[in-house]
Image (tube, coloured by chain):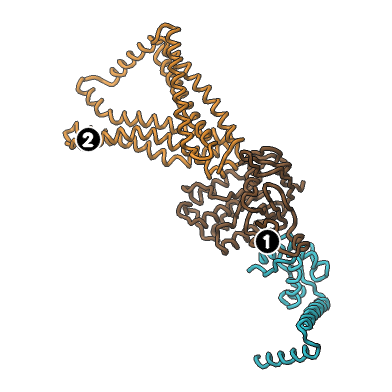
Chain colours: A orange, B cyan, C brown
């Protein structure tokens, strides 16, 4: 059944998600072509350049926001509004309902990050290749330099090397995304318990939660720094602690979500 | 078109009357196969269980009979149908006479009235 | 086991107000049952409890021996009193959705009914009138070969011709082992297709009787009896 849930979550979300992330990529490509043109003596009016840059920044930021808002909205709509009458009478467990939505959300969250980086890479590609050509360098040399610099940082922070640090940071990043999705679900579920203004309640709870967490995080950072007496050196430890806290919270949020869905469903 | 049924009397009784009438008037011929309970219920727009109950009762009275595999049929006993017809007509006439007496006509007046109206109708036809 | 639905001391409070108040009720298989009662008598609450959209405050409801859950949701087909389908969906999406999630969904039955109403699989819900959407929902609900159908106000808000269509749909899809529970205000419209009726008043069962029993003993229609019992 999880597979079927995933299939229909996918069907419900892919168009919007592909659209907004595709737009981010497309605008990057457009800029890239523009830069390529300029490098080959094409004249583009300043106004167009300014407008383009504005649009580009907006779309990159918007792609992230829209991804999160649409996926959060999908969770809310499919479970806690009239559509919930269908969703919650399917012969499917709450675990399957939450997990399928979570996995699709996670997927599009990652796709969004890749699209933003991909878009930036596309935009930069002509500039980089032009720079390389002018200074008679190859990509290899540049990559080696970057590699060296980051390896130094990694060793400084106490990692065995750059691959270890990359893996570590990826893990930390993933934990962050998992946490934020579960936190959004949690706030939506809590918000649904209100008899009216459910969305407003969810948003307020979300901001409240983030504020509380911010305080806790800065507290732990500060304390860890003092205890280890080495702010830079304690950086990975702080990240690790944070990630564990986020994952622990994500698990708690998951169970609260499930409890609300099973026992406290409040469809109007 | 759903069958016209009164709202005050049991539905199964009304179904029985209706099917009886359909047999007497020859809408269903002796020996003819009756539609299935489901189809009849659908046609009449009544509950299938109620239809079933009514048909069972008609079976007990002998107007219908069941052949195990092929369904329900109208009786081939034309004498029985004839008797039914007489019974039904008798009931109607009794009721009519009763009403006429309530209105205050005596028997001669009733006879005269019937004769007058029948003549009139014959002219129109 | 012929008992399909059992409610024991079933109670649901909203705040301090009981919507259902220690309701005891048993429904057998193979019945078409009218769930009747004035506004706020607990009809919708009962249907939501049967479908697991609410959890009882007290008591229990059993469908085929199970509390509401995945087992019961596979055998109960529910038509809520509102539009519950995503507007962005096409009819063919919905058919696929139902076929995927409900093993008892009879695709050919649904196709046949849609065709007779000239609704195309490529039609999008958004472009349909309210009445058409309601028919699509009814078709989806009745195309399942479920054991218990819960229809919440299926004929409210549609014209008399559509009402006839809905009633004949219910009759045509009726199966001797299934029970259909219909909640409605429009008693006289559905009276003839019911086996038995339940009168709910203030969350309690006021009466459970067969339609013909009522007509025989009271000499009135269920509709007339309802008006008398719930006279304001």
| Mark 1 closeness class: few <14, some 14–19, many ≥20 residues within 10 Å | some
Residue drawn at 47 percent across, 53 percent down: C122
Vertical arrangement, residue C126 with respect to residue A20, above or below:
below
Name the outermost residue toward the top.
Answer: A229
The residue at which mark 1 appears reads as C223
- Which residue in the structure is indicated by mark 2? A49
Residue A2 left/right relative to C216: left
- Alpha carbon separation for disc pair 2 and 1: 75 Å
Exactly how many numbered labels are in the figure? 2
The residue shown at (71%, 42%) is C22
Question: Is A38 or A254 nearer to us in this picture?
Answer: A254
Residue C175 visible, this orientation: no
Do marks 2 and 1 both belong to one polypeptide chain? no
> In the rendered view, does B32 fall on the left or right side of C14?
right
* Rendering coords of residue C96 (x, y %): 54, 47
Element marked by disc 2: helix
Q: In the displayed structure, would residue C189 be above or below residue C83?
A: below
The quadrant in which the N terminus of chain B is found is: bottom right
Q: Are the residues tagged 2 and 1 within 8 Å (C-beta)?
A: no
Of all residues shown, which one is farthest toward the front? Answer: C232
- Residue A190 point in image, percent of width and height: 53, 33
At a point 64% along the width and 40% down the height, the residue shown is: C13
| Residue at (68% x, 47% y) in the render | C203
Who is closer to the viewer here, A245 or B35? Answer: A245
> Residue A75: which numbered mark, if any?
none
């Amino acid at each position: 059944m999880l597979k079927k849930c995933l299939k229909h979550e996918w069907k419900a979300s892919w168009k919007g998600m592909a659209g907004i992330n595709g737009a981010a990529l497309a605008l990057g490509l457009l800029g890239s072509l523009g830069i390529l043109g300029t490098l080959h003596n094409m004249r583009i009016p300043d106004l167009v350049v300014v407008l383009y840059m504005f649009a580009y920044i907006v779309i990159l930021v918007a792609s992230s926001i829209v991804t999160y808002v649409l996926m959060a909205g999908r969770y809310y709509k499919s479970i806690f509004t009239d559509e919930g009458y269908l969703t919650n009478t399917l012969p499917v467990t709450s675990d399957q309902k939450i997990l399928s939505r979570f996995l699709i959300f996670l997927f599009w969250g990652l796709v969004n990050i890749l699209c933003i980086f991909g878009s930036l890479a596309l935009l930069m590609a002509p500039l980089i290749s032009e720079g390389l050509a002018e200074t008679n360098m190859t990509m290899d040399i540049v990559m080696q330099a970057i590699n060296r610099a980051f390896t130094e940082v990694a060793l400084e922070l106490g990692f065995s090397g750059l691959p270890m640090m990359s893996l570590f940071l990826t893990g930390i990043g993933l934990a962050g995304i998992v946490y934020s999705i579960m936190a959004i679900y949690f706030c939506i579920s809590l918000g649904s318990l209100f008899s009216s203004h459910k969305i407003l309640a969810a948003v307020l709870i979300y901001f409240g939660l983030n504020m509380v967490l911010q305080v806790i995080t800065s507290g732990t950072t500060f304390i860890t720094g003092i205890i280890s007496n080495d702010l830079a050196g304690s950086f990975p430890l702080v990240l690790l602690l944070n990630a564990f806290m986020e994952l622990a919270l994500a698990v708690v949020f998951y169970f609260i979500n499930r409890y609300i869905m099973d026992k406290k469903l409040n469809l109007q | 078109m759903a069958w016209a049924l009164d709202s005050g009397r049991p539905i199964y009784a009304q179904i029985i009357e209706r099917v009886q009438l359909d047999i007497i008037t020859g809408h269903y011929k002796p020996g003819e196969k009756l539609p299935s309970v489901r189809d009849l219920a659908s046609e009449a727009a009544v509950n299938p269980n109620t239809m079933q109950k009514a048909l069972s009762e008609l079976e007990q009275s002998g107007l219908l009979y069941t052949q195990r595999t092929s369904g329900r049929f109208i009786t081939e006993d034309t004498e029985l149908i004839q008797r039914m017809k007489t019974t039904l007509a008798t009931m109607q006439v009794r009721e009519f006479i009763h009403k006429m007496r309530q209105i205050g006509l005596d028997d001669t007046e009733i006879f005269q009235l019937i004769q007058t109206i029948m003549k009139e109708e014959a002219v129109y036809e | 086991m012929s008992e399909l639905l059992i409610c024991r001391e079933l109670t649901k409070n909203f705040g301090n107000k009981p919507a259902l108040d220690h309701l005891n009720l048993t429904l057998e298989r193979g019945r078409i049952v009218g769930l009747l009662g004035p506004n706020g008598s607990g009809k919708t609450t009962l249907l939501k409890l049967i479908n697991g959209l609410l959890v009882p405050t007290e008591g229990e409801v059993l469908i085929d021996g199970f509390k509401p859950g995945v087992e019961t949701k596979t055998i109960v087909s529910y038509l809520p009193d509102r539009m519950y389908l995503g507007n962005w969906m096409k009819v063919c999406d919905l058919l696929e959705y139902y076929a995927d999630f409900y093993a008892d969904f009879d695709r050919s039955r649904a196709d046949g009914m849609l065709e007779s109403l000239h609704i195309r699989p490529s039609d999008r819900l958004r472009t349909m009138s309210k009445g058409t959407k309601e028919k699509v929902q009814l078709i989806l609900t009745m195309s399942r070969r479920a054991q218990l159908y819960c229809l919440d106000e299926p004929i409210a808000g549609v014209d008399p011709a559509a009402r006839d269509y809905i009633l004949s749909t219910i009759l045509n899809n009726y199966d001797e082992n299934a029970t259909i529970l219909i909640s409605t205000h429009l008693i006289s419209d559905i009276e003839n297709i019911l086996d038995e009726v339940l009168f709910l008043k203030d969350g309690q069962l006021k009466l459970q009787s067969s339609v013909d029993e009522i007509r025989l003993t009271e000499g009135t229609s269920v509709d007339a009896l309802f008006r008398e019992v719930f006279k304001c």
